[in-house]
Image: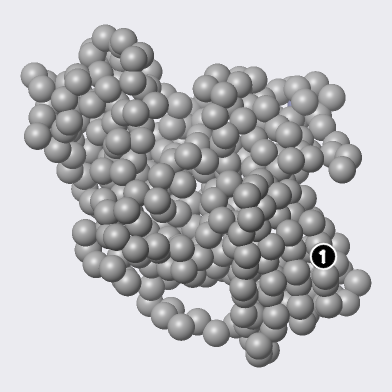
Amino acid sequence: MSVIRCRECGGPIYTRIFRRWNSDGTVTGRLSSGVRICHIEAGEVCAMVEGVSARIGYPIDRIVVEGERKASRNITCETLSAGRGLLGIIGRSWGGSPVSLKISLAISRSVGFGAPEVLKYIRGRELKLKVQNPFCVPIVVGDLWGNFEALHRITAEASWEEEPGAVTINMVKVRDEMVEEYPDRLSLQKMATLPGDVGFDRCRRCGIPREVTGSIEWDLDAGVVTSRVTGRREVTVMVEGVNAVISELTGELGDEIPGMVQQVEQEYVAGKMEGSRLPDTTREYGVLLDELRVMGMGNPVEVEKEGERLKVRINNPFCEPLLAGRVGGYYKALEGVTPLVTWTPDEEGYTVIEANPA
Ligand SMILES: [Zn+2]
């Protein structure tokens, strides 16, 4: 598959067309500025699904699929309603929908979800895909399912079969229009509400920050994105998707879910930092938190260490439990102590996260 890249920095064209790095610590879609996205290690997302599953004692894949499917539907609808709905009129038309599908699948590759291949497509009725290298099966299934439904304004049923390194997804229309089972459970969109002055060193040609092109390796044939710094796989996900999955799990399984997500993330981050002997200074925490901005996770504006207490304020947080887990992970790795972490809900555009020795 040939993909056009920027001649100056090598960033793939879909990244340039669809993403914008903002000065408030967020990354948003370019066509539909109401869609917030973020970059995250694939392992963090997998750890969240597997870690919560392990703590609860049964698989949660179905619930994860459902959360992601809803967010994907919403976001595809929002994208197609851009330009006073013109994009949707073209995108959903008889000739346009195969093109829209092709674009969606190319985006899947460029964000690192894996490499989807169409096995069967009957416009508006049936879609069978085989995805090689899916980074997290329930997220990839939910994403493609919701996308297919929104593209054709239908409700579809989906079944999928996993094999090592691939998943085959079969989607069949069951009725016209999209049915929302629990509309109240839709998570709130996490959009930026507080301005910031985050600066990036951008490519002169395409505007992608050099921190991004310099640290990310895109294998667009495989649909795999890897960090040159850590060597680990990374993905770009919809912020609404992450929050929809957590709220779907909370709705089904109870209020202890956000705390579990925080702990799983804390273990993941601390585990990856094991052996990295860093000084436990306020400055070191600041350096670690810096990466949140280019990832689109938020804008850390205050870091305070008083005795053993660490306090961090993050503006425009993408997801409080995951950020609290990240801060807890840094704390555990730097101090060598498992912390007790609390956080305030984002009501006015920020969260305050506190870590103390447990
Ligand atoms: Zn460039």
The x and y percentages for residue 46 are: 46, 47
Task: Give the image quarter of residue 9.
Answer: top right
Query: With respect to residue 212, does 322 lie above or below?
Result: below
Residue 261 visible in rendering: yes
Furthest-right residue in view? 95
Q: Residue at x 64, y 47 (%)?
A: 165
Q: Is the N terminus in the top left, top right, bottom left or bottom right quadrant?
A: top right
Residue linked to disc 1: 119
The x and y percentages for residue 271 are: 34, 28
| Horizontal relation, residue 285 to residue 135: left or right | left
Give SS at disc 1.
strand
Image region (quadrant) for ligand 1:
top right
Work out whether residue 268 or residue 25 is closer to the camera in this orientation and state it.
268
Q: Residue at x 27, y 54 (%)?
A: 55
| Horizontal relation, residue 222 to residue 167: left or right | right
Residue 352 visible in rendering: no
Work out whether residue 300 or residue 215 is closer to the camera in this orientation and state it.
215
How many marks the image carries: the answer is 1
The x and y percentages for residue 80 are: 70, 66
| Horizontal relation, residue 219 to residue 326: left or right | right
Work out whether residue 172 or residue 182 is closer to the camera in this orientation and state it.
172
